Image (spheres, grey):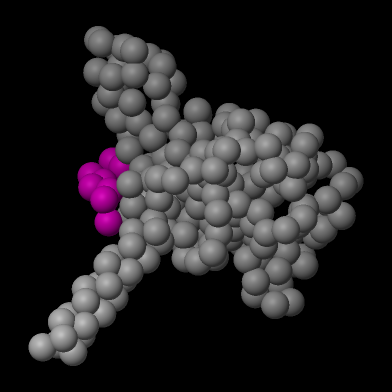
């Protein structure tokens, strides 16, 4: 009897451990899949980015970045995009390779090389959630009503080894009456990359606050 009780205790423990592990693999209400970056990644919130992770003292200065085309939007299970949302997500996806390259080239100047053809660090990304919001609600109600949003993942991968060295996950909300999801998104992108260039990834990450959900 004691042996059977011990067996059931072990089974219960394994089930709880498994559930905990599955829960720990996602953040941001399921929109952030930690394993896409690194299963052991610890994300922090910084000034311009909701979730940032950097391995060790990895930095972008002095590196050559290869910006890859983004795949089709990969909506998180919790997302319920309609036709307009999917269209906006595809538009942003198509623009991101050049938008990222231009933002990093502008912010870092000659401190790194930005290319869509080659580099020792591969820059990959994807759209995981997108909503156009409600224009009518914005105009009639204001104060964030009808807000649209776009959520993306970006990771920096060492070309020689395939190891992910850093990454971020961020949600941009077009909360003002007249702002649109796409305009607010690209303005944020420029600001976020400028912050990376100004402080450097290691310092930016070190000053961040660990996020638990």
State left or right for residue 13 relative to residue 165. Answer: left
- Which quarter of the rendering shows the C terminus? top left
**Of helix, strand and loop, which mostly describes the magenta segment?**
loop
Q: Position of residue 86 (x, y in %)?
A: 32, 48
- Which quarter of the rendering shows the N terminus? bottom left
Q: Quadrant of residue 125?
A: bottom right
Residue lying farthest to the front in this orientation: 2
Residue drawn at point x = 64 percent, y = 47 percent: 100
Q: Position of residue 2 (x, y in %)?
A: 16, 86
State left or right for residue 132 relative to residue 40. Answer: left
**Visible in this render: residue 42?**
yes
* The one of 154 and 81 positioned closer to us in this rendering: 154
Query: Quick check: is 41 in the magenta stretch?
Result: no
Q: Position of residue 150 (x, y in %)?
A: 42, 40
State left or right for residue 149 relative to residue 98. Answer: left
Query: Quick check: is 78 in the magenta stretch?
Result: yes
Q: Position of residue 108 (x, y in %)?
A: 81, 42
The stretch of residues the image draws in magenta is: 77-86
Residue drawn at point x = 34 percent, y = 13 percent: 143
Residue drawn at point x = 42 percent, y = 26 percent: 174
- How many marks do you count on the picture? 0
């Amino acid at each position: 009897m004691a042996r059977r009780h011990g067996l059931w205790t072990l089974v219960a423990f394994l089930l709880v451990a498994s559930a905990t592990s599955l829960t720990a693999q996602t953040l941001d209400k399921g929109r952030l899949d930690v394993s896409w970056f690194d299963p052991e990644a610890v994300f922090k919130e910084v000034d311009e980015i909701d979730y940032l992770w950097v391995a060790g003292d990895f930095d972008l200065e002095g590196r050559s970045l290869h910006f890859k085309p983004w795949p089709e939007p990969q909506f998180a299970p919790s997302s319920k995009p309609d036709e307009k949302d999917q269209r906006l997500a595809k538009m942003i996806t198509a623009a991101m390779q050049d938008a990222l390259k231009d933002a990093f080239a502008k912010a870092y100047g000659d401190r790194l090389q930005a290319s869509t053809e080659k580099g020792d660090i591969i820059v990959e990304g994807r759209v995981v959630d997108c909503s156009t919001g409600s224009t009518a609600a914005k105009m009639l109600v204001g104060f964030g009503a009808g807000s649209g949003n776009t959520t993306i993942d970006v990771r920096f991968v060492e070309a020689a080894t395939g190891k992910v060295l850093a990454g971020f996950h961020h949600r941009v909300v077009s909360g003002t009456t007249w702002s649109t999801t796409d305009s607010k998104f690209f303005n944020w992108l420029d600001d976020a990359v400028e912050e990376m260039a100004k402080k450097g990834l290691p310092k930016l990450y070190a000053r961040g606050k660990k996020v638990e959900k």
